[in-house]
Amino acid sequence: MVSLNIIGCLAQLVERRSPKPQVGGSIPSALVIFKRRFYMTSKTVQFPTTSNVKKSASMLGDFKSEMRKLTWPTKAEVTRGTKAVLASLFVFGLGIYVVDLSIRGALNLIQTAVNVLFR
């Protein structure tokens, strides 16, 4: 059964919260942002113009030219990198296993000592 003291504390927390109708939680609500942008001002809605289309086309051309400048790794480099990652994972995994075994052994030794001494 929940004590009345806890319910009273919760009621006080709710009462002391400041009302913020434009906020839907800890971050602004998407609906409020949508209403602000599209219903309150008519200038925010922009239709594509020829300059916007030209900008998009030039951005696409820039993207293509940048993609041509990239140098992709060879199959041998990818294989060598994959082997290095797998080897390091194995080494670190083995190291964590050894540390885990040593800690477990030390705790078992302490537990055995406590059981022997205090029984």
Image (cartoon, grey):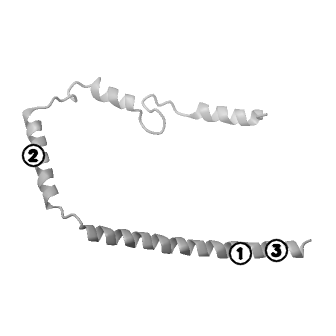
State left or right for residue 1 relative to residue 43.
right
State left or right for residue 59 relative to residue 119.
left
The answer to whether marks 3 and 1 mark residues whose Cβ atoms lie closer than 8 Å is no
Judged from the image, the secondary structure of the residue bearing numbered disc 2 is helix
Which quadrant of the structure image shows residue 105? bottom right
Q: Which residue is drawn at the image coordinates 71% and 33% (left, top)?
A: 7
Give amino acid for label 3. Answer: Thr
Which of the two discs, 1 and 2, sits closer to the camera? 1
Is residue 86 positioned above or below 31 on the image?
A: below
Earlier sequence position, callout 3 versus callout 2: 2
Judged from the image, the secondary structure of the residue bearing numbered disc 1 is helix
Is residue 77 positioned above or below 38 on the image?
A: below
Which of the two discs, 3 and 2, sits closer to the camera? 3
The answer to whether marks 1 and 2 mark residues whose Cβ atoms lie closer than 8 Å is no
Give amino acid for label 1. Answer: Gly
Q: Which residue is drawn at the image coordinates 66% and 35% (left, top)?
A: 10
Earlier sequence position, callout 1 versus callout 2: 2
Is residue 116 positioned above or below 34 on the image?
A: below
Percent of width and height locating residue 99: 61, 75
Earlier sequence position, callout 3 versus callout 1: 1
Give the quarter of the figure containing the C terminus.
bottom right
Q: Which residue is mark 1?
A: 105
Q: Nearer the viewer, residue 61 or 19?
A: 61
Q: Nearer the viewer, residue 116 or 51?
A: 116
- Tag 2: Cα neighbours inside 10 Å, few (<14), some, or many (≥20)? few
Give amino acid for label 2. Answer: Ser
Q: Which residue is mark 3?
A: 112
Q: Which residue is mark 2?
A: 58
